[in-house]
Amino acid sequence: MSEQIKVKMRGENVCVHYGEKQALFDVNLDIGTNQVTSLIGPSGCGKSTFLRCLNRMNDTIDICRVTGDLTLDGQNIYDRAIDVVELRARVGMVFQKPNPFPKSIYENVAYGPRIHGLTRDKTEMDEVVENSLKRAGIWEEVKDRLDQPGTGLSGGQQQRLCIARAIATKPEVLLMDEPCSALDPIATAIIEELIDELRENFTIAIVTHSMQQAARVSQKTAFFHLGKLIEEGDTEEIFTNPQNKKTQDYITGRIG
Amino acid sequence: MAGYLILTIIAFSLIAFWIGRSAGNKFVADAQGTTVHSLPGYHGAFVAVWVGLPALVLLLLWLVFQDNVIDSLLLSSLPQSEIAGLTPAQLNLVMTEIKTVASGTIFGEPAPHIMQGAETLTRWRGIAGWAMVATSVCLMLLMLFFTRSRLSARFRARNQFEAVISGLMIFCSVAAILTTIGIIVSLLYESYAFFQLVPPHEFFFGLNWEPQIAIREDQVAGAGAFGAVPVFYGTLVIATLAMAVATPIGLFTAIYLAEYASERFRNIVKPILEILAGVPTVVYGFFAVLTVAPAIREAGTLMGLATSPNSALAAGGVMGIMIIPFISSLSDDAIRAVPRSMSDGSLAMGATRAETITRVLLPAALPGIMGGILLALSRAIGETMIVVMAAGLIATMTINPLDSVTTVTVQIVTLLIGDTAFDSPKTLAAFALGLVLFFVTLCLNVVALRIVQKYREQYE
């Protein structure tokens, strides 16, 4: 990793237990500012678990226990002084399955700014909604039907709506958990392009099952296997010259 | 006789099943080149159904019509000298006496034509019974031979049997619908009779309800007034009180159970709450009248308020407790049915738990919650026992919950007990009240269905 990239989030010796079962073993991983970091690996390898540690979504699972240090701008996010609500406002998330709220498209995007009091009046809110939808590349498609339910959109549009919703809160980090797995290739291409654009303003961590996707959108790649971080490094390096045998096997399709 | 016959029919069906299945087994064993269409069991079931069902239908029809036929035969066999010039009611009396004698209960010395009639009746009944058995058995044998002859390797026994079963399901669903239609028709019929006696505008807009009119000349009673507004007003007051108690308590219970309570706590508390709905309403009734009403009266007296012994508050409050589980249980289910991805999506944006509940979960669960509330409301409007015991009988237009009020259901009960005559407006008024009540709850149900349908698929 080149020296001029600032570390946005850092995990040190992160272990996660679900009840008796350990899901993550001593993971050390940095997420660089304004970079796209992709987490790859076979199903059940812990990549989503690690991602969910980064905005403490694992807190919603009763039996889940996280140890080790996770920092955002050098501050431990599991510290008592940290308000989890504030943390999640700074570290947004887009899920595998598009999950727009059963509200209008406008209300979906306005949800975050509204609960965090980011806007003072209706005009300002309109601006935020328009900007977010534009940034998510869906404005042209929905500008005439903002009052219609977000659930009526197609899968790809729904996912872009969810991205718009996430960036409307103006987070610093955007976590994406297999955002394209439920989408067709065209919608996937649109979202990938979008991720590349969003990198300018956000730090992005993305979990993906598609190696091509990781190669296309990310600057850094981390390979997980059976709860352990096997290898991490520049995406080009990982895909052309992997150091570990397991990484090589996985990216060439021999394990997975 | 009918009981034995039913056993016989069952036995015949079992034999028929066995015969059909053996035939099926034989087709399977003999199959060469051609395949057998249905499993042997379906051959058996096909034969059994066609043997058993027609016999059962015949039995039912026989039982329905037997008495009518025998009665008319008996009537015509009675000596003309005895029954000439009798009114239908008196004829009815004679027939009843004959039947009583025939069943072995003899008071005093019945007239000879009655004794003879009873003998004839007993004899005919015996003949009819045996005729029924003989006809049924013949029918079953006939059907057995006919259906057995239809079986073959390519015979579609499965499709035939399934057609019979689907017919049976249609019959069952139609039975419920027909019952509802029957109830509506009888209500309409009696209400029409009522509105012949009392003009509709008086019933719907009259403010005075004094239905205790004299049905005999020598009775002392009021002049009679059938303005239903105070009665419906009372129902409205009681139902509002009940909903005011039940909606917040039920809804908050549901939110707590669905979102905050631990799984263990929920598993204990939810069944206990549902017991509330299972307590007999008469028990709630005496709880209201013996415990709650005196407590309210004393509290009222302490505060210097005039409180009637039967207060709307006691009845409405206790009814509210009773319908809590309708709201809490259904709302809890509705909230938990909202996909986890919804609350995850909201939490991941930095919404607090309370914000997630009020802004995402409750709107998404709204159909279920509304369904629960409307179900509870229909229950509150139709509830009788608690209000009969605790609310009072006098129809007053009051909004004071410490006064006694009366409801539609209470009035229906009081109109139909005691001295009644089916052609007096007093009795018929009960049907008119019932019709309006039925209409109101029907509308509520339709509204509930509408709401559920409109929002059902929103989050999918």
Image (cartoon, rainbow, N blue to C red):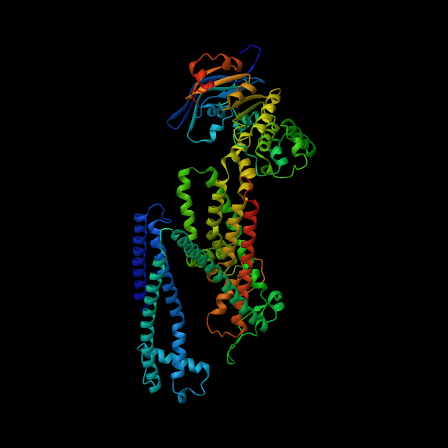
Q: List x then y, in percent, for residue A155.
A: 57, 33
Residue B118: percent from the left, percent from the top?
33, 81
Q: Is residue B417 visible?
A: yes
Spot occupied by residue A153 in the image (x, y as percentages of width and height)? 60, 36
Q: Image check: B425 left or right of B281?
A: right
Q: Residue furthest bottom?
A: B81
Give the quarter of the figure containing the C terminus of chain A.
Answer: top left
Image height of B306 relative to B195, above or below: above
**Which of B124/B327 is in front?**
B124
Q: From what the image shows, is residue B184 above or below residue A251?
A: below
Q: Is residue B406 visible?
A: no
- Name the residue at the right extreme: A123
Depicted B438 relative to depicted B419: above or below? above
B256 shown above or below B230: above
Q: Quadrant of residue A245?
A: top left
Compare residues B352 and B135 and report the one nearer the observer.
Answer: B135
Q: Kindly identify the residue that appears in the image at 38 percent across and 53 percent down.
A: B157
Q: Position of residue B255 (x, y in %)?
A: 49, 41
Residue at (57%, 13%) from the top-left corner?
A5
Q: Is residue B144 left or right of residue B393?
A: left
Figure label count: 0
Location of residue B442 by image quarter: bottom right
The quarter of the displayed image where residue A8 is located: top right
